[in-house]
Amino acid sequence: MKLQHLTLLTTIIVLTILLCSTAGCITGRETTNRTVIRVLPAGSLLQPFDEVEKAFEAQHPDVDVQIEGHGSIQVIRQVTDLHRQVDVIAVADASLIPDLMFRQDPATGVNFTDSYTPFARNAMVIAFTNKSRYAEQITPDNWQEILTRPDVRVGFSNPMLDAAGYRTIMVTILASEYYHNATIFPAVIGSHFSQPLTVNCSTGIQVVELPEIMRPSDTKLVIRDGSIYVLSLLESGGIDYAFEYRSVAEGHELCYINLPEKIDLSSPDHAAVYRNVSVILGFQRFSAIGKDRRGLPIVYAITVPNSAPHPDQAREFSDMVILMTKEGGKGWPSPF
């Protein structure tokens, strides 16, 4: 008899838990059917977009903004290659959108997107911490010498996936020319691969062609898929210096060296100088749509894919991004 009572009591408890879970009493709040808006930004936008998410959800309690950061190329490939349902895409290189998305989706016959809005600028810097080797010695005048020292470890993101990666290569090539020192690019980056990366100037433009797999041959150079992983290495002491965006360095309270405008890809006034550098991506899937990334001033852009499940809310979110970028703040890129 006691066993029957115990079984009955157990059944009642289980049913109560299931009913409460369905009603929302496990979390202490009533569950609602919120519209999920999926936003994929470049990794350098994660901190600002966290603020946009909070502001947007405060205005729209019925919306759940879900943000997932990647390198800029990888962000676009989530839609074009993996065919994920995404509402908003924001990248750190505006030119990637027309190059990779102004083309038909074979499944629908419709372009992946037909428009985009530039909304921010940035600059490449050299980020470090107080624990980095020679942190007390590095200056805007000697950074190139510090980074070439054998015991200094340098990191940047994968150029096949992230705009900051191919921009790092551009910056070091531009630095070689700016400082009249052709050894800067090979000493910092080019010579640290089993097949060294070389600069070809036969067309009058300085061109570097990358292998499909970016795998350094020694421990001096470290490459990670996205800038967020590079930052983790820098903050943990796994590397000494990282090529990063200024807004990211400021947002993470890192030390950093500003570079001359003719090098840092920040200024439209020097666009002609930047265009003298080109990085050809080795990723074969880009062969049909162009693998050539030319040096350009850094411009961020945002778009709503034509396949966005919630285009109205996506456009409203995009408008808020543009507005909040103009207001700025810690960790935000400069408004366009």
Image (cartoon, rainbow, N blue to C red):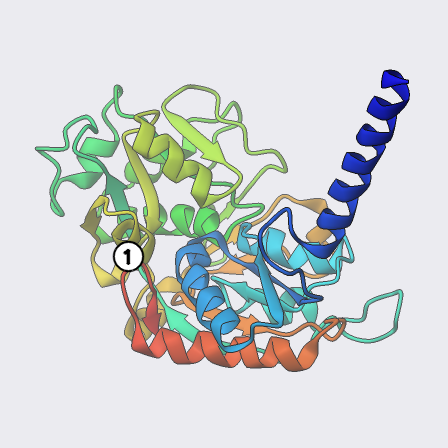
Q: Nearer the viewer, residue 68 or 246?
A: 68
- Identify residue for label 1: 263
**Residue 45 visible (yes or no):** yes
Residue 21 located left or right of residue 66: right
Kind of residue at disc 1:
Ile
Direction front: furthest residue: 1
Residue in the image at 13% along x and 47% along y = 140
Picture layout, residue 280 above or below residue 92:
above
Report the front residue among 168 and 13.
13
**Residue at image point 82% right, 23% down:** 6
Residue 114 visible in the snapshot: no
Quadrant for the C terminus in the image: bottom left
Q: Is residue 282 above or below residue 188?
A: below
Count of numbered tags: 1
Q: Is residue 165 left or right of residue 231?
A: right
- At mark 1, the secondary structure is helix
Q: Is residue 129 above or below residue 84?
A: above
Residue sitting farthest toward the left: 136
Is 116 situated left or right of 285 in this image? left
Q: Dot 1 surroundings within 10 Å: few (below 14), some, or many (20 or more)?
A: many
* Spot occupied by residue 104 in the image (x, y as percentages of width and height): 80, 71
Residue 109 position within the rendered picture, expressed as x and y whole percent measured from the top left = 87, 73
- x then y, percent, for residue 266: 31, 65
At horizontal 30% and vertical 71% (from top left) the residue drawn is 328
At 34% from the left edge and 44% from the top edge, which residue is drawn?
A: 243
| x and y percentages locating residue 58 in the rendered image | 48, 72
Q: What quarter of the picture does the N terminus occupy?
A: top right
